[in-house]
Image (cartoon, coloured by chain):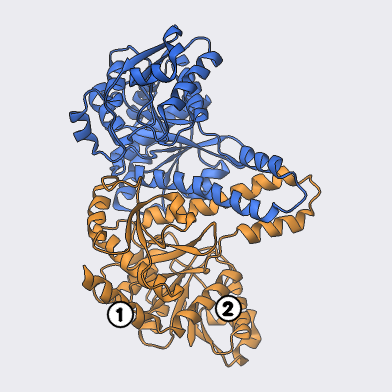
Chain colours: A blue, B orange
Amino acid sequence: LIIGIDVESGERSFKEYVKGAITSIKLHENICISLIGNTEKIINSFPDITENKRISLVDSNEIIFMDEEPIKALKKKKNSTIAIGINLLKENKIDVFYSPGNTGAIVCAAIFKLGMIEGVKRPSMATYFPRIEGGETLITDIGSNPDASEINLLHNAVLGMSYYKLIWKKENPTVGLLNMGGESIKGTSILKKAYNLLKTIPSFIGNVEGYNVFNGSVDVVVCNGLTGNSILKIAEASKKYFISMIEKKFLSDNYNNHEYKKIITKKLLPVYFGAAPLLGVNGIVLIGHGASSIEDLLNAITLAIKLNSINFINELNDNVKKLLKKD
Amino acid sequence: LIIGIDVESGERSFKEYVKGAITSIKLHENICISLIGNTEKIINSFPDITENKRISLVDSNEIIFMDEEPIKALKKKKNSTIAIGINLLKENKIDVFYSPGNTGAIVCAAIFKLGMIEGVKRPSMATYFPRIEGGETLITDIGSNPDASEINLLHNAVLGMSYYKLIWKKENPTVGLLNMGGESIKGTSILKKAYNLLKTIPSFIGNVEGYNVFNGSVDVVVCNGLTGNSILKIAEASKKYFISMIEKKFLSDNYNNHEYKKIITKKLLPVYFGAAPLLGVNGIVLIGHGASSIEDLLNAITLAIKLNSINFINELNDNVKKLLKKD
């Protein structure tokens, strides 16, 4: 298993990602890593790295920045870490590509170079929310396709259900459409049409709302990329808000504050995989948060190993085909 | 000041709203209340109510349910609490109308009967999120217009800024567009167009994300009704999730659990007004949560008194006019 890591496109220094890579090969015996970035800079900072047989360096002298228009940037920057990474994946020189960079550029490169799996028009990015009674709820899309049509939403459902089944070994995961109320007549015109398409899925439970995400009443929550991205970021920001409030309130109390904070943040921190898979493209692409930390990268590598071990792309393909045939 | 209360359309019993009304006239000297609902049922449950000079009963024998299609329901049910309440507001027989009912039906009735203030095409529902360092951030729209166009988003901004100014006495509240990243090229095609329209507002700070809502970096956050509704519900659900996690963790510890829970819920509970004003229509319409409690109703009445005291509709009109002229 060879994992390609884009060390340049994130908001943190390339050094963080190189350190993460070095740590990860110590943790996992059977992986090799290709670091995609400025080779000279990497060697200057980590002179011993050239002696590491399980780490290879792939030189890239261009970076696509967060504020660049994806298609223009990809045309202009053929040697960017994102373009090179997706090409390596296409050519099977790596098995997984991880990038914490410009989501739009990663999505466009993946669609154009890797292509879509059969029957699916647009990819969907998926992540987990924690549940009160344990377990997790999959939310998809969280940002790859903000302008999702009703067909895209149906495909998000099918991709999400297949992913859920493969990771959580649940045969018919339930699926719900994130909307403004339980009633089928709610929401935008696209949501109303999507509701009618989703009705053909036997495990569709109808419209869902915020509380369903946390209470375990639905496995896969389908939404457009704008709404999914917004709820993910509000949930993360809510967490910080609550932790701040608790700290303010209890800082003077007789708990050991350091211990206390650790318990709260560990216990309350939703356990994400560190990166969201881009479901629907012909290749394993993991998109990290722009500000991804070493820990996030290590979680992403754990996910990469898991996905590789279950022959993910073929399995996803098979499951999606079966689900789409039912419609 | 006469406040009309729809006692039938919420998810709770009419008795809750009647009790809330009785409590509120004890708390506030200068208000009268019109209870809109089944008069006979109300008198059966509260026989003394006919002797209360500050409470009047307006009979309505129809209810628009949550799952009804708004326009059809309004055409069919001319004697519904929502139709009667909006009519009373139109005829100046009440000064404020409060309903915890079908949002779509309230919005449609308000648009058709009351009309819009000059220059604004669609109303926007607004509510507050709490900030880490105190104060509150206004989010608008939270559900009245899920399919918002770029013009609707501009109007949401102008309505939100005017409301913020009137309530919080801040001359030029800052405004941000909820999007998937800070860069102007992010998001749906409508968001990109909206960004260009909002740029003409001097206090526009650009795109904002989840963390901006809680950190005080922006006063008014603009979004479509679907996204606004979703983030509000996720924030509420996150709160429940965190409280559950904390309770599980600390239930066995030496805090007085009852006291502890009270502190956490009181301290962490975002202080909403109990109902969201429907900004942009020619009349003060407050829309409550379907499951609104007596406390929510009392908060809504406090907001009604506040809005009435500042001559809200005229002031909002003037402020919106000024802001739209600048563009």
**In the foreground, B158 or B305:** B158
Q: Is residue A222 above or below residue B75?
A: above
Label 2 or label 1, whichever lies nearer to me, is 1
Q: What SS does tag 1 mark? A: helix
For residue B304, side relative to residue A141 (left or right): right
The crowd level at tag 2 (other Cα within 10 Å; few <14, some 14-19, many 20+) is few
Q: Is residue B297 above or below residue A205?
A: below
Q: Is residue A186 visible?
A: no
Amino acid at pointer 2 = Lys
Image quarter of residue A315: top left
Q: Chain of mark 1?
A: B
Q: Chain of mark 2?
A: B
Q: CA distance from mark 2 to mark 1?
A: 43 Å
Which sits earlier in the primary sequence, circle 2 or circle 1?
2
Q: Position of residue B274 (x, y in %)?
A: 53, 68
Q: Residue at x 59, y 59 (%)?
A: B269
**Mark sitting on residue B41:** 2
Q: Are marks 2 and 1 on the same chain?
A: yes
**Mark sitting on residue A219:** none
For residue A77, side relative to residue B72 (left or right): left
Circle 1 residue: B318
Q: Position of residue A306 (x, y in %)?
A: 49, 19
Image quarter of residue B176: bottom left
Amino acid at pointer 1 = Asp
Image quarter of residue A10: top left
**In the foreground, A184 or A61:** A61
Q: Position of residue B243 (x, y in %)?
A: 64, 50
**In the foreground, B266 or A156:** B266
For residue B37, side relative to residue A111 (left or right): right
